[in-house]
Amino acid sequence: MRQVTVTEHLLLHQTQSPAATGQFTRLLYDLILSAKIVSRNVNNAGLLDVLGATGGINVQGEAVQKLDELANKTLIHRMERAGVLCAMASEENADIIRIPDRFAKGDYLLIFDPLDGSSNIDANINVGTIFSIFRRERPESVDVSAEDFLRPGVEQVAAGYFLYGPSTMLVYTTGQGVHGFTLDPTVGEFLLSHPDIRIPSQGKIYSVNESNWHYWDEATREVVEYFKGANNELGRPYSLRYVGSLVADFHRSLLYGGVFLYPMDYKHPDKPRGKLRLLCEASPLAFLAEQAGGLASDGTRRILDITPKTLHDRVPLFIGSPSEVSRIISIYQTHREKASHA
Ligand code: AHM
Ligand code: MG
């Protein structure tokens, strides 16, 4: 059987993509190398002194795990040397990460969540690295700043994730479909295993942290009741699966269909909000979902159309098969209409 590597695939099949340049191939090569290092550390986590928390709290107000920090450092160290980036932004860093003057710079902006789902890591449950790539718009003469990153997801040139699971996978898009590669550890290469992934138009699974029920509004409860009840398009209750690692829950939804939900909640009544980050989580996964024939919405707006106001903006996220996501949008719509007539 012919084994296709990521670089071969990019050169052979993605020639129409704005990402099909030498610089982009280099970017992907270094990203893959970073992910192989992270994957090795995740796989050996139980044997090395890298489990548990650092004691620090990140910009999101969440406990930093040692592996979060290691993955973040690995990505920054490799990618600042790639010579193709003008800056980076990470879920773990409050500000943008500039490329030091001693390294060459390029046209691309890289955004990443170095280790998504890391609260699961001590239990040996799947985690992943999510990435999003933009080309810089402003001229080189203008100093790079956070403003360069505040762009809607529709402008991404590529996005994807590495999933550190029973096998390590890369799933990515450059706007020409979604393609999955599996790391063959014996040769150290990601090989094409899932060409042109299409999400089923309807699934049988919903995925949500239902313990937030008490913090949801009426519309959100109705959405979840729709999936739990028998009075839906399926004619019976959907199954519930929730890993608590977005990248793993999304990957399952992509392959099996269904929907992943992280709605807005009122845990902090004065500040209702979604949990997931627009730039490093929702936007890249929305690009993949749409390229696979799915949908991604915040309940009202298409995720890819939302322009962030800050680097760490959060959004509600409903992502997956078109049938389930459009149903959710219509339930919210009906609630808004009722409220406006009340
Ligand atoms: P992280 O990037 O710090 O791991 O946080 C994001 C994670 C997602 O992977 C997952 O979907 C969500 O948080 C789970 O949150 P909760 O524990 O509130 O259900
Ligand atoms: Mg995350």
Image (cartoon, rainbow, N blue to C red):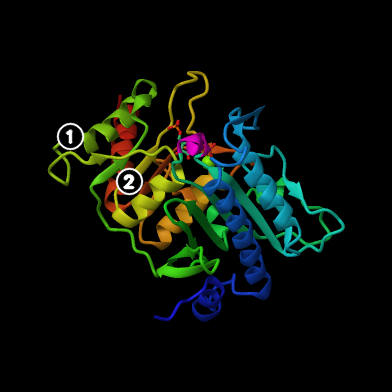
The residue most toward the front is 47
The image's mark for residue 229 is 1
Q: Is residue 94 left or right of residue 226?
A: right
Q: Is residue 132 visible to the viewer in this orientation of the structure?
A: yes
**Residue at 23% across / 47% down in the picture?**
204
Within the image, what quadrant is residue 207 found in? Answer: top left
Residue 106 position (above or below residue 289): below
Q: Position of residue 110 (x, y in %)?
A: 65, 55
Within the image, what quadrant is residue 58 found in? Answer: top right
Residue type, label 2:
Val
Q: CA distance from mark 2 to mark 1?
A: 15 Å
Residue type, label 1:
Gly
Q: Is residue 148 left or right of residue 199?
A: right
Q: Does residue 113 show up magenta in the picture?
A: no
Q: Foreground: 341 or 236?
A: 236
Disc 2 marks which residue? 259
Figure disc tally: 2
**What segment carries the magenta color?**
118-123
The residue most toward the top is 269
Q: Position of residue 2 (x, y in %)?
A: 43, 81
Q: Position of residue 174 (x, y in %)?
A: 52, 66
